[in-house]
Amino acid sequence: MRWRPFYLAQLKLALAQPFALAFVVLALTFSLALGLIAQNKTDRQLTVAFVLEDSNQLANRLVALTARQETLEVVVMSRQAAFRALNQDKLEAVFVVTERFSEQIAQGAYRRLVERYTSPSARYTAMVSEPVIASAMLLWAESRLLQQTERALNELDLAYSDAIRDDHIRRMDAVWINDTTIRISEIVQDVALPPDSQTEPERGPLAQVLGWYAALCVFYLMACPAWILDLKRPSLAERVAQANVRGWQILLLASLAPVTICLAGGLLAGFGAGVFLNAGLFRVIAALPALLVFLMATVGQMLVLARWMRQTLLFLFAAPLVTFVQAVLSGLLLPLPPWAGLLKQLALLLPGSHLAALLTASPGLMSAAAWLGLLLSMLGWLGLGILLNSRAMVQVTRTR
């Protein structure tokens, strides 16, 4: 059997369907538009609220130092108003300055000075927390320096007047503005998450675009089952048997046509993210193999369903449900909240969870575990799907 003409015929047949080209255009437009929206949210100021349980001047200075960040819009609110705004998703985070803030700073303590509250939908927790961490650390370091200066002057029987103290504070402020700040994560107690939890890495523009695009590919593959249903027809199954071609070879080659369309769209989506969202070219190229493995794993899931579904209408009914489960449970659209630990474990069975992990990872930290999980997921789903449908094709041939 000539494989290349068969593949080209399948590809031509897939492209001849109006839904194929419409899908590519809509998926590209939709995913890039969502990426632009996410990028605009990152570029504009993020709003955070401070609740001051400590009325000392140091607490007010913490707010003033944090407000110097151009990426943040800082407001001071009452506790009730702040949490109401947080529940309405109007704030990225609420920082409660504890009533012992100034006392602990004066004592040289730096743990749990500020409580951070975030909503499950917050996506820029680290971005808004770092300025608060740095500002609190500056106040702690400043307090220690002032105390040591006063102690040294007292040993010399010299007075440390308020005027000299204020002058030192102004000079240190100038240093803080012009020089690098220190970041120590222990200064913030994250009360919205368990103490042993870790902050999810923030998603870049490429992860946003390809995550949505991959979810739309699941719907496309599930809603276009013509190629697999045609292969299960008795006449074609008999021709395959007469040509002495194994069923798994036909299934793999036929599946490459819709996968090629999805991969071509993914390439355009990646380069679109590179042009419009400043995603690195290396990231785009590195993400394409992962997208290909994900698409083949999704084909495997489709083949498993095809073992019991024999009509296009059944696939059309199943496509939204499968897409929703794959996209949401895998975290392709948004990361799962910290409390969804059991769902995260179940999501490891889905290829989308491993793809999301690879898209989120930085270039130097491409997780080998995520790659291994993605490959095993593809081999498992694709192997099971081919096994079930190959047996079905053999049974059809024997029946005839």
Image (spheres, grey):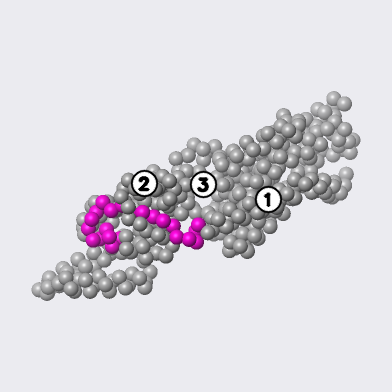
Q: Secondary structure at mark 2?
A: helix
Based on the displayed image, in which of its 4 quarters is residue 270 positioned? Answer: bottom right
Q: Quadrant of the N terminus?
A: top right
Give amino acid for label 3: Pro
> Looking at the image, which residue is at 32% across and 63% down?
64
Q: Within the magenta stretch, is there residue 167?
A: no
Query: Dot 2: within a 10 Å radius of its alpha carbon, few (fewer than 14), some, or many (20 or more) residues?
Result: many
Circle 1 sits on which residue?
Answer: 26
Circle 2 sits on which residue?
Answer: 83
The answer to whether mark 3 and mark 2 are in CB contact below 8 A is no
Q: Secondary structure at mark 3?
A: loop
> Looking at the image, which residue is at 23% across and 74% down?
167
Q: Magenta residues?
A: 41-62
> Looking at the image, which residue is at 33% across and 69% down?
176
- First in residue order: circle 2 vs circle 1: 1
> How far apart are the alpha carbons under marks 3 and 2?
22 Å
> Looking at the image, which residue is at 87% across and 33% down?
235
Of circles 3 and 2, the one toward us is 2
